[in-house]
Image (cartoon, helix red, strand yellow):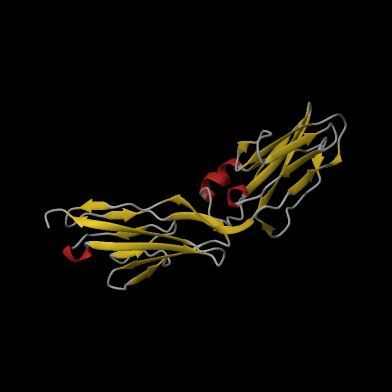
Amino acid sequence: MRFTLTMKPPSSARSGLPALFLLSCLVSWSSSEDVVKIRPFHFPKFVEEGEEVPIVCGLRERDEDVKFSWFKDCFLLEPQKGVKILSTGEFSVLTITDANGQSSGNYTCKAEVSTGRDDHTAELLVKGPPSWRSKPSDVSANLGDRVKFPCETFGFPIPRITWTNENGDLWEMEPEKETPTRVHVIKDGAFVIETVKEEDGGLYTCKASNGIGVGLQKTIRLNIIGE
């Protein structure tokens, strides 16, 4: 019996776990003799919050009863509030009973028999307003320090993050540069000041919006020590 290891990169169309982490754990094991083979499945292209979403993990072929297991973003899924799992020796049905933004993710069905196994992964994207993953908060810094204000959110469509100050200056995420500007917004929405100057002290506001709901907003203060 010989197995082939295949890496399945996630589509990373949502704001969630780091793509590198997902890539490292979405691993496919397939038997060269195809003793068990999952029939590929897909979630609906767009799912609204509150919808019930069933998905069937069936088999193209098998030679004995199969043990099924489900994973979300590489973590084992068990029946719980909002998640139902019904399995037989021939198929398994996963049902998300009340989809919301946190339901979005990569779902993997694994089928195992005594002589082999197979898995298949599909991504669920739930349309919903932004939610906080990491809120910004007040920071005190010395002149010359590097400061970073988090503003990490998730939602689908992916939220647009902007930062403003009390002078009306606006910053958005910019393409990665070998030498970034002194003040910039990085990929996860965090606001970075590479070298704090006296004039940087004051109020900053992070806003996140994706066209659904009212969006998120948080204002914080950068205090310059010694002023």
Look at the image and tell me whether residue 58 can be seen: yes
- Above or below, 201 against 104 in this view is below
Q: Quadrant of residue 171?
A: bottom left
- Comparing 6 with 2, the one in front is 6
Q: Name the quadrant of the N terminus.
A: top right
- Comparing 1 with 169, the one in front is 169
Q: Residue 31 location, x and y as percent?
A: 76, 37
Look at the image and tell me whether residue 179 can be seen: no
Q: Residue 48 location, x and y as percent?
A: 67, 58
- Above or below, 226 against 32 in this view is below
Residue at the spot 55% in from the left edge and 67% down from the top edge: 211
Locate residue 126 relative to residue 184 in the image: left or right: right
Locate residue 126 relative to residue 1 in the image: left or right: left
Furthest residue in direction top, as rendered: 114
Residue at the spot 69% in from the left edge and 60% down from the top edge: 46
- Comparing 198 with 4, the one in front is 198
Residue at the spot 88% in from the left edge and 32% down from the top edge: 63
Furthest residue in direction bottom, as rendered: 168
Q: Residue 154 location, x and y as percent?
A: 52, 54
Residue at the spot 31% in from the left edge and 73% down from the top edge: 168
Q: Residue 45 location, x and y as percent?
A: 71, 60
